Image: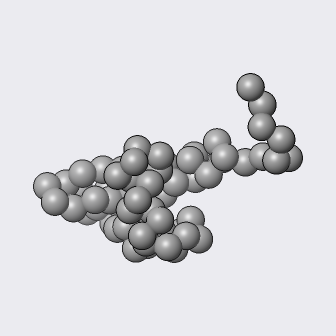
Amino acid sequence: MNRTVESNLLDSKAAAKFLGVSFRSLEGWRVKGFGPKFVKLGKLVRYRPAELTQWLNKRTRSHTVKRK
């Protein structure tokens, strides 16, 4: 793998810190398919910062009213 690409990937703990959530929350979201997209490298799970930002942006709201 290219060193530049490799250095841009975050492990689960760093990704959770980036999002401001616990490692366990991020892990649970991943298992349930709710969380941000991730990269699977063998047994390793890594996150691209751009995917984390995109995931956050999709959840930005101006109110708490649910729309149907």
Left or right placement of residue 45 versus residue 35 in this view: left
Q: Is residue 36 above or below residue 13?
A: above
Q: Is residue 8 visible?
A: no
Q: Nearer the viewer, residue 50 or 58?
A: 58
Q: Is residue 30 above or below residue 19?
A: above
Residue ID at (85%, 46%): 63
User: Percent from the top left, x then y, of residue 46?
Assistant: 32, 59
Left or right placement of residue 18 versus residue 6 in this view: right
Quadrant the C terminus occupies? top right
Residue lying furthest top: 68
User: Percent from the top left, x then y, of residue 10?
Assistant: 38, 65
Rendered image coloring scheme: one colour
User: Percent from the top left, x then y, of residue 29?
Assistant: 44, 54
Left or right placement of residue 66 versus residue 12 in this view: right
Q: Is residue 66 visible?
A: yes
User: Percent from the top left, x then y, of residue 51?
Assistant: 49, 48
Q: Nearer the viewer, residue 50 or 40?
A: 40
Left or right placement of residue 53 versus residue 63 in this view: left
Q: Is residue 13 above or below residue 57?
A: below
Residue ID at (47%, 46%): 34
Residue ID at (52%, 54%): 52
Residue ID at (57%, 46%): 54
Question: How many numbered marks are there?
Answer: 0
Quadrant the N terminus occupies? bottom left
